[in-house]
Image: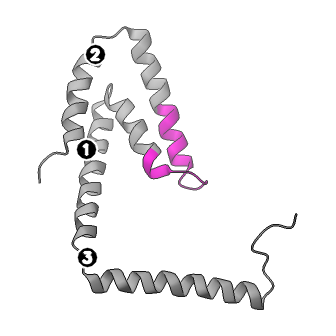
Amino acid sequence: MTQPSLVERLREQRERHMERSKIVRAGFVVGGFTVLLAGIAMLLLPGPAFVVIPVGLAMLSLEFAWAGRLLEAALVQAEKAQQSAKETTTAQRVAVAVAVVLAVAAFVVAAILWDIPILPYV
């Protein structure tokens, strides 16, 4: 499997980043860890964790090889998942759509039968 183009761009960016002042580089490290920790927290809290974590890793990959390796692995897995999703059959897509519709219908029925408030009282 080929490397995602983002990986190549990050490697080029890393070379330019190493020429920056130590203060700017330290800012990237602090910012990268902050964004990464926020993304990890979003795994349990509401938020786009699967968007924020790679951004933090991308920032950290400018300074640390381990972050670059993690980011590369994540991007390769994301590419595999995207390819796998493209290869689904029409029957699989219909089955997922039916399952989603049935789940929504079950929630609506449960909300009506058990008097679950769907909207907060105003």
Residue occupied by mark 3: 88
Dominant secondary structure, magenta = helix
Give the quadrant of the N terminus. Answer: bottom left
Separation (CA) of disc 2 from disc 3: 43 Å
The part of the chain drawn in magenta is 33-51
Dot placed on the residue nearer the N-terminal end, 3 or 1: 1
Separation (CA) of disc 3 from disc 1: 25 Å
At horizontal 46% and vertical 85% (from top left) the residue drawn is 99
Q: What element carries label 3?
A: loop
Q: What element carries label 2?
A: loop
Please report contact status of discs 2 and 3: CB closer than 8 Å, yes or no: no
Residue occupied by mark 1: 72
Q: Which residue lies furthest to the right in this view?
A: 122
Separation (CA) of disc 1 from disc 2: 19 Å
Image vertical order of residue 103 relative to residue 10, above or below: below
Q: Is 38 one of the magenta-colored residues?
A: yes
Residue occupied by mark 2: 18
In the picture, the disc for residue 10 is: none
Q: What residue type is labelled 2?
A: Met
Q: Is 9 one of the magenta-colored residues?
A: no
Q: Position of residue 61 (x, y in %)?
A: 32, 32
Q: Is mark 1 on a helix, strand or loop?
A: helix
